[in-house]
Amino acid sequence: MTAKRHSNRAGNLSYFLRYGAVVGVIKLASIPLVLSISVLLARWLGPEEYGVYAISWSLATIGAVAVSGGVSQYLTRRVAMLNTKNRHPEVRPAITASMQFVTLAALLFLLVLAIGWMLDATSLKLSGQTIVLVFLSATFIGVVNIGSAGLRGLERASEGQLYLLIMAPLTSILLLILLMQIPVPRTSWAALAVMAAGYGLAASLSQLRLRRLTKGFGRSGPAHTLVPALAVQSKGYIAYSTLMIVGLQLNLIMVGFLLQEEDVSYYNLADKAAQFVWLPVGIFELLMATRVARLHSEGNFGAIQKLYRSLSLAGGAAALLVAGLLYALGEHIISLLLGPFYAGNIYPVLLLLLVAQLIRAAFGPVTVTLLMTGRQNYCVASQLTGIAAIAAATWLLVPSYGLHGAGMAACIGMLAASLPLAIGGYRTLGLRPLFL
C-alpha cells in the first residue's frame, strides 16, 4: 500500500512538471506576441491615438472579466471536480450554462456602454463605433475565457492557453500587419477592429474544440435550468474577477482622466513591461488550479501548504531575476523598440511598477489557492482594499507628481491588496508567505 502511494505521488509530480513545462512554454511564447502588438500599435498610431486605444482596450478588458472572469474560474473548479468523480454527464450542461450566463452578461455590458456613451461619461469622447468594438472585444475575450476554463478543468490547460495566449494575439498581429499595408486612417477604431477580429476567431475555435471533447459525455438535463444556480454559486468569483480587473486597470483609467492621452501611452507600456515580473508566479497559479481543487476535495491541506511554499520560492526567485534584468536593461530595450523619446518617459515609471510587481510576487500564488478552495471572500476583500487604496493614492499623487505619482499609487495599492490575501491564506489554510 505504501509503495503504491509513493508511486502515485511520483506519477503526480512527473505529470505536474511536464504539464508546467508545456504551459510555461506557451506563456513565454505569448510574451513577444503581446509585446509586438503594443509596439506595432504605438508606432503606427502615435502617442495620442494609442492613448485612446489603451483606454478603450482597458474598458474591453474590464468588460470581458465582468462578463466571464468569475464564471470561468468557477467553471474550472466545477469541471475539475466533476471530471475527477467521473460525473461526465454533468460537464456539458455546466459549460453550456456558463455560456448562456456569459451571453446575458454581455448584453448587460452593452447596455452599460450605451448608457455611458449617451451620457458622455468619458472625457475621451469615444465614438459610437469604438463603443461597439469595445463590446465585441469584451464578448469575444469572454468566450475564449470560458473555452479555456472548460479545457483547463478537463486537464487540457495547454490547449486552452493556446487559444487565449497564442491564437488570439497571433491572428491580431497578422491582421494588423495587413491593415498597415492599406492606406486607411491611423485611428484607435481601426486598431480595436483588428483586435476584435483576432479574438473572435480564437473564441470560435476554442468553443469548437470544447464541443468535440465533450461530445461523448452526454447530458444530465437542460442547461438553462442551471443558470440561476450557477449565478448564485459563482457570485463570489464574479465579484472577485470584476474587482480584480477594475483594480488592475483603475490606475491607467485615472491617468487618462487626470493627465493627457500621451501619458496613458507611457503608463500602459510601462505597466505591460512590469507584468513580466509577475509572469513566473502567474504561470504557477495557472498550473496549481486543478491540483489545488483536487487536494482540497481530498482534505489534503498539508500537500496544499507544501505546494504553495515550493512554488512561492520558485516564483519569487524568478520574479527577482526578471526585475533585475528590467532594471539593468529596460531603458535600452525600450529605446531600441520605440526610440529614445518613449524610453525617457517610460523607464522612470517602469522602475516604480517593478516594485509594485515584486510586492505582489512576494506573497506567492495565494490567490488561486484561496479561489480553488472556495475561500473567494478573502479575494473579494483584497480587491476592495486595493481599489480603495489605489484610487485614493492616484487622486492625491498624480496631480502633483504625474506618472511618478501613478507608479507610487500602484505600489500602495498592491500592498493594500496583498495583506487580506495573506491573512486569509494563513487563517484558513495555514499558508505563510516566505518572508514571514
Image (cartoon, rainbow, N blue to C red):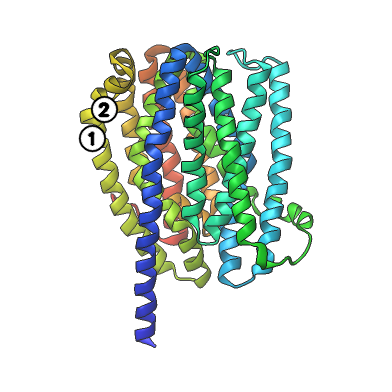
Q: Residue at x 20, y 30 (%)?
A: 328
Q: Position of residue 105 (x, y in %)?
A: 70, 40
Q: Which residue is drawn at 31% across and 12% down?
A: 341
Mark before the other along the chain sequence, 2 or 1: 1
Q: Which residue is drawn at 24% across and 41% down?
A: 321
Question: Is 5 placed left or right of 147 in the picture?
Answer: left
Badge 2: how crowded within 10 Å, few (<14), some, or many (20+)?
many
Residue at the extreme bottom: 1
What is the number of the mark on residue 325?
Answer: 1
What is the secondary structure assignment of the residue under circle 1? Answer: helix
Alpha carbon distance from label 2 to label 1 = 7 Å
Which of 398/50 is in front?
Answer: 50
Q: Position of residue 316 (x, y in %)?
A: 29, 47
Res. 237 visible in picture:
no
- Up-down: is 420 above or below 339? below
Which picture quadrant has residue 224? bottom right
What is the secondary structure assignment of the residue under circle 2? Answer: helix
Q: Position of residue 317 (x, y in %)?
A: 26, 47
Work out which quarter of the rendered image holds the N terminus and state it.
bottom left
Label 2–label 1 contact, CB within 8 A: yes
Q: Write down the residue under mark 2.
A: 330
Question: Is 271 placed left or right of 143 in the picture?
Answer: left
